[in-house]
Amino acid sequence: MLGLTMKRAMRGLGELALIERIRSGWGHPGAGEAARGSSGGAHGVVLGIGDDCAILRPPRGHEVLVTTDFTLEGRHFRRDLHPPESVGHRALARGLSDLAAMGARPLAAFLSLALPGEMMRTRPGRAWVRRFFAGLRGLAGRSGVELAGGDTAESPCGLVLADIVLVGSAPAGRALRRGAAHPGDLLYVTGELGGSAAELASIRLAGNPGGPSFPASRPQTGWPILRGSIAKGGLPSPMPAFEGSPVPHPQLYPQPRLAVGLALLRRRLATASIDLSDGLSTDLAHLCRESGVGAEVSAQSLPIHPLARKSPGALQLAGALQLALDGGEDYELLFAASPATRVPRRIAGVPITRIGALVSGRAITLIDSTGRRLPLKVGGWEHFIKRH
Ligand SMILES: [Mg+2]
């Protein structure tokens, strides 16, 4: 497991300075302060960075949920396509979205980060790291989660490798799971679908694949979607609201639906839930398999993100419907609810759309605009680098 103090594997490369920068930038409460129940930091972290272990205290009557995600350069992001703030944001967003899917509240995040040596030796490299943490810290702050520990090492392969562990909590026995839906339940999604893949397609078309390894050192040009909306530091300005829809930069700054997940659990609205990380067609199949049901989805009812509808870059690669079904990385929630449950049209400011129903059997069917029934094949991508 993780060494919770930042280790010294990068000795001589400014690792201690890096740790101090992370620590001072985080503003975590002292042990005594948190132990007394101060609201000065993220809830649940009694002791954060600085000792051998972090100490977490889940609320009384809660269980602890844990999820972990690799963020690997070349697999999950590219330095020449994703601004460093986006890389930090996305690394955290993936785990937060998993917590949201289960109706959990985040307690703490732990980051193991391997950086190429030149990142600590060069000014552009250090700038990249600083901006990575700015993106991560921004989402963490808006999500009420504290970076409570981690590890650093020099990457042996010249690539940035990050592993984030998210710890959350939910009332005992109440966490939303994939496997508790029933035939007859109705299917809903939050927000819009396909925007992340559409934005990525546009960035790829306008970007500079194979370009310089430190994009922070060159002006950001050729970003048609982002032009005019990137502030001096590289962050979209203003930063998108934490909840609400549509997400203006669904690929670069996806917004985990934590408040929706909490509401689904608290109000007992959902029988099962999953987050849409790999695409609706893939994640629906996961939910159906775990619940032992089939599904019917209406193509016309799918809420397609405006970027998927409009982006000429995206449309050159795939139709808007395909982006919504297979695009992935939207980090919206897909959930099932009993037909007897009144599901609001908005939860925590996020639109909720009914897209179909669960049925007995195992078939997953897409009903197109003419009423034709087609098997909905699993087509979610397995990360963009691999596919292209
Ligand atoms: Mg997930």
Image (cartoon, helix red, strand yellow):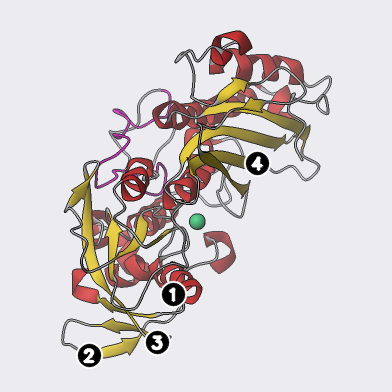
Q: Which residue is mark 4?
A: 162
* Closer to the camera in the image, 129 or 5: 5
Task: Please state which amino acid type lies under the numbered disc 3.
Answer: Ala
Checking the image for residue 372, the label placed there is 2
* Closer to the camera in the image, 207 or 362: 362
Checking the image for residue 363, the label placed there is 3
* Closer to the camera in the image, 65 or 8: 65
Q: On the image, which quarter does residue 341 sit in?
A: bottom left
Label 3 crowd (10 A; few <14 / some 14-19 / many >=20): some
Helix or strand or loop: what does disc 2 sit on?
Answer: loop
The answer to whether residue 242 is seen in the rendering is: yes
Sequence-wise, which precedes: disc 1 or disc 3?
A: 1
Helix or strand or loop: what does disc 4 sit on?
Answer: strand
Q: Please give the range of residues in magenta.
A: 233-255
Q: Position of residue 5 (x, y in %)?
A: 75, 24
Helix or strand or loop: what does disc 3 sit on?
Answer: loop
Checking the image for residue 56, the label placed there is none
Sequence-wise, which precedes: disc 1 or disc 2?
A: 1
- Using the numbered discs, state the Cα–Cα distance from disc 1 to disc 2 in whole angstroms: 21 Å
Q: Which residue is mark 1?
A: 288
**Which of the two discs, 3 and 4, sits closer to the camera?**
3
From the image, which quarter does the N terminus lie in?
top right
Disc 2 to disc 4: CB gap under 8 Å: no
Task: Please state which amino acid type lies under the numbered disc 4.
Answer: Ala
